[in-house]
Structure formats: C-alpha cells, structure tokens
Image: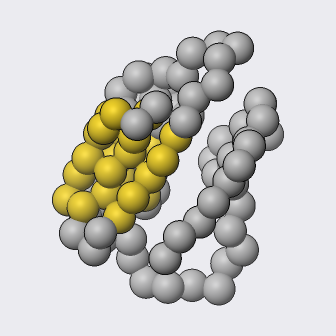
Amino acid sequence: VEPGTGVAFGGNAAPNRVTTGQQLPVNQWVHVAGTFDGTTLRCYLNGQLAGSVAGTLGPANSAPLILGRSGTCGDGLVGLLDEVALYN
C-alpha cells in the first residue's frame, strides 16, 4: 500500500505496475488479489476489479518471494496476512 496510489502490483514503476487508487480501510479485513495473464496485470479488492494495466512482469529471477514488504517500504505491512495462496 502506497500513499496516494493504494495497493500496487507488478513492477517498480509504470507501465508494468497496476495501482488501485484507493487506500485500504483501517481495522477491516480486505481480500486482495493480483493476477497476470501474460499481457494484463489486474488488482482486485474484495472481488471487484480495482485497477488494470497492460504490461509485463520482467525476466525470471532467483530472488526470494517476500509478501507484505518491498525494498522501498521500510518496515512493511503493519497488519496480518491470512490464507495466502499462489497459483501458476
């Protein structure tokens, strides 16, 4: 979650990044899902499409997967992650 852009999914910057444009509510569970079909990145909040952009994910790498944190967001998510699932 980034101030002013809301939830962001994808690369570090446009055009390979989708944002929701809305902040998440405080003290309320929100279902967040990000998808990529090879051409379009989509972000859903509580089952509703909140943003989409055509783009790519970039090359494969061997970096570890980190949820709830980015290299630029300090301490990361202040909250809980529940029922995380990854699909290919």
Residue 71 image position (x, y, % from top left): 66, 54
Residue 27 image position (x, y, % from top left): 70, 14
- Asked whether the viewer can see residue 71, the reply is no
Q: Residue at x 39, y 76 (%)?
A: 58
Q: Residue at x 49, y 76 (%)?
A: 88
Image quarter hosting the N terminus: top right
Left or right of 85, for residue 32: left
In the rendered image, the vertical position of residue 56 relative to residue 74, given as above or below: below
**Residue 57 lies in what quarter of the image?**
bottom left
Residue 63 image position (x, y, % from top left): 67, 78
**Residue 24 lies in what quarter of the image?**
top right
Q: Nearer the viewer, residue 57 or 88?
A: 88
Q: Residue at x 41, y 22 (%)?
A: 22
In the rendered image, the vertical position of residue 75 relative to residue 79, given as above or below: below
Left or right of 72, for residue 21: left
Q: Residue at x 77, y 30 (%)?
A: 79
